[in-house]
């Protein structure tokens, strides 16, 4: 099949890597000529996401279209919906945090306490204020612990905000789920995710999670992906506090915390995404070896200096400008022996986890 991918970042690149293994050809759409996807795609259309002519061109050159990030042009996605198995409900709901949390709450999934933020009258502690739209990797977020934080708060009057209870969670997890057009849903072994400054640092899929946590998180993710009538791979992030699973956000696309599945599972989150959007049935994933995925940000390029050892898999995204907090690549380390796994990871990141 000819697959059109809107968005040329690393997620698009890894979707394409999975797709070419099934013999599909790829055409990408991205404003940046030498974006990560351009190194894998058969051809690229270099244009803005809201360029209708470019979208028409993409539709003409592909049998099926997918998107790899949230901030694509919703109007155009809706116009070409018959070609987009992922559909647009996941996008429409997740691009507004307030709508997303209300949608999930209505499904009976626990969320943190949240409200629209309009003025200082809405402040409570401890809390976190986030832009309602457009935020990612912790951008546009302000934590409020006391009056001092409020005094330093500078919000953009043009933007809408949500205020959420700041949860002192025990840990974070994500459920990566894939659903096909027949309604089958499969979920991946659940990673424990550690963030630094709101950006994913590592995902560990080796720690035993309590059965109740696994079953609640899986049930909630299943309900979300099914209610969105979504086809493809989607990720749901949760906080866990005292064994209780609480929804944070979902992403209607493969996810950073699911990168480990490329080598860690029998079928990756990208392969299942491609199978689903091409009308095939999704495959049940299982863990082949315990895995840790480490993000290589611009300030962590030295992680690449220490990659001696078996079962260490490096993925660099071919981004030319190395910038602080920019995701440049990732490393997946596999080992069934958890002590050896930890040693290998420490050798790379040089700090305790
Ligand atoms: P983004 O879209 O930037 O990923 P998130 O809402 O997932 O936004 O926030 C990024 C990270 O910030 C989360 O993974 C978590 O570590 C922290 N965080 C976000 N919201 C809360 C909250 N209500 N309580 C505690 N920590 C939070
Ligand atoms: Mg997040």
Image (tube, rainbow, N blue to C red):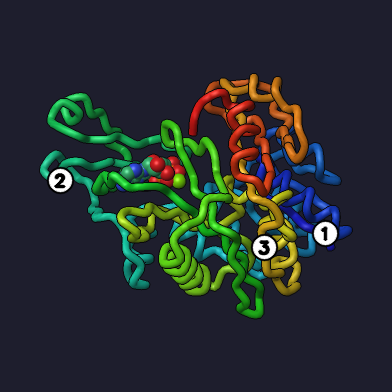
Q: Which residue, given by chain and number where applicable, does mark 2 sit on?
A: 122
Q: Earlier in the sequence, mark 2 or mark 3?
A: 2
Q: Is residue 177 left or right of residue 47?
A: left
**Place of residue 328 in the rendered image (x, y in percent of width and height, measured from the top left):** 64, 30
Q: CA distance from mark 2 to mark 1?
A: 50 Å
Secondary structure at badge 1 equals strand
Report the number of numbered marks.
3
Q: Residues within 10 Å of mark 2 (few under 14, many from 20)?
A: few
Q: Which residue, given by chain and number where applicable, does mark 3 sit on?
A: 286
Q: Is residue 304 left or right of residue 145?
A: right
**Along the line of sight, the residue nearer the viewer: 102 or 31:** 102
Vertical arrangement, residue 276 with respect to residue 66, above or below: below
Residue at horizontal 71%, vertical 59%? 65
Report the disc number at residue 241: none
**Along the line of sight, the residue nearer the viewer: 164 or 289:** 289
Q: Which residue, given by chain and number where applicable, does mark 1 sit on?
A: 2
């Amino acid at each position: 099949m000819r697959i059109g991918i809107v968005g040329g970042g690393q997620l698009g690149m890894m979707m394409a890597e999975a797709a070419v293994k099934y013999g599909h050809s790829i055409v990408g759409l991205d404003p940046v000529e030498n974006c990560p996807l351009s190194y894998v795609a058969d051809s690229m259309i270099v244009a803005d996401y809201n360029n209708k002519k470019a979208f028409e061109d993409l539709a003409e050159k592909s049998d099926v279209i997918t998107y790899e990030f949230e901030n694509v042009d919703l109007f155009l996605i809706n116009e070409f919906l018959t070609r987009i198995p992922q559909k647009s409900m996941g996008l429409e709901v997740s691009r507004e945090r307030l709508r997303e949390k209300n949608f999930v709450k209505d499904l009976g999934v626990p969320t943190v306490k949240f409200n629209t933020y309009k003025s200082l009258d809405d402040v409570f502690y401890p809390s976190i204020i986030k832009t309602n739209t457009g935020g990612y990797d912790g951008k546009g977020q302000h934590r409020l612990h006391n009056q001092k934080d409020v005094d330093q708060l500078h919000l953009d009057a043009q933007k809408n905000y949500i205020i959420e209870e700041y949860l002192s969670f025990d840990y974070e997890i994500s459920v990566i789920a894939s659903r096909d057009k027949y309604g089958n849903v499969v979920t991946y072994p659940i990673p424990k995710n550690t963030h630094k400054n709101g950006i994913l640092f590592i995902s560990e899929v080796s720690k035993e999670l309590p059965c109740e946590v696994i079953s609640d998180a899986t049930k909630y993710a299943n309900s979300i992906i099914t209610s969105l009538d979504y086809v493809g791979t989607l990720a749901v992030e949760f906080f866990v506090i005292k064994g209780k699973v609480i929804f944070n956000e979902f992403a209607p696309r493969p996810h950073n915390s699911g990168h480990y599945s490329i080598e860690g599972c029998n079928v990756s989150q990208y392969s299942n995404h491609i199978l689903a959007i091409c009308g095939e049935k999704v495959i049940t994933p299982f863990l082949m070896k315990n895995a840790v995925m480490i993000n290589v940000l611009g300030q962590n390029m030295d992680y690449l200096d220490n990659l001696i050892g078996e079962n260490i898999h490096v993925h660099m995204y071919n981004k030319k400008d190395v910038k602080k907090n920019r995701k440049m690549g990732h490393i997946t380390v596999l080992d069934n022996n958890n002590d050896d796994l930890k040693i290998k990871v420490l050798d790379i990141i040089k700090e305790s986890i």
